[in-house]
Amino acid sequence: MALRDRITEDMKSAMRAGEKERLATIRLALAAIKQREVDERITLDDPQVLSVLEKMIKQRREAITQFASGGRADLVAKETAEIAVLQGYLPVQMSPAELDELITAAIATTGASSIKDMGKVMAAVRPKAQGRADMGAVSARIKQKLG
């Protein structure tokens, strides 16, 4: 079953179960997916849907930082709950050891030797880590290894 179809089915089950917060988050995700499809005039496949979900999670993490600094614990809790629902659609996250192994292999295959070669390494790592690791953290790890 395609990821988008799974999200739609989860929306229906959340409606039936009366889970209002979960339903609202799922509707936001479907709206973001539909908006991207309309904007780009395409039908999104699973990797593209994952990128939409990752972007939504990143936005919520940034919002949590802002709300926490503003002393809004209620909004922090709401955003955290939304992240939990959205992460349910992402694949199992890579362990730090798996990520280091992937980065080391990418550095070896691309022949990267300095920070100038970071783009090559990121291009090699991204398809394998997309949806399974925070790409910001991946970038920081690559910098650390090349630097």
Image (cartoon, rainbow, N blue to C red):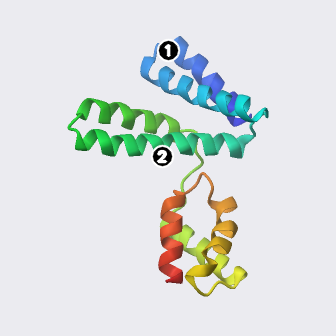
Q: Which residue is mark 1?
A: 17
> For the residue labelled by badge 2, is the local secondary structure a helix, a strand or a loop?
helix
Residue beneath the point at 54% across and 59% down: 135
**Residue indicated by mark 2:** 58
Of residues 39 and 8, the one drawn nearer to the viewer in this rendering: 39
Q: Quadrant of residue 112?
A: bottom right
| Cα distance in 3D space between marks 1 and 2 | 28 Å
Instruction: Tell which residue pokes out farthest to the bottom in this image.
Output: 113
Height in image: 122 above or below 70? below
| 46 is higher (above) or lower (below) than 16 | below
Whichever of callouts 1 and 2 sits on the residue coming sooner in the sequence is: 1
Q: What amino acid is at disc 1?
A: Ala
Q: Is residue 144 left or right of residue 108?
A: left
Q: Quadrant of the N terminus?
A: top right
**Which image quadrant is residue 69 in?**
top left
Q: Residues within 10 Å of mark 2 (few under 14, many from 20)?
A: some
Q: Observer-nearest residue: 11 or 35?
A: 35
Q: Could one spot residue 6 in this view of the protein?
A: no
| Outermost right residue | 42
What residue occupies the far left of the structure in this picture?
Answer: 71
Percent across and percent down for residue 94 are: 55, 60
The three-letter amino acid code for the residue at tag 2 is Lys
Q: Is residue 24 above or below residue 1?
A: above
Q: Is disc 1 surrounded by few (<14), some (14 to 19) or many (20+) residues within 10 Å?
A: few
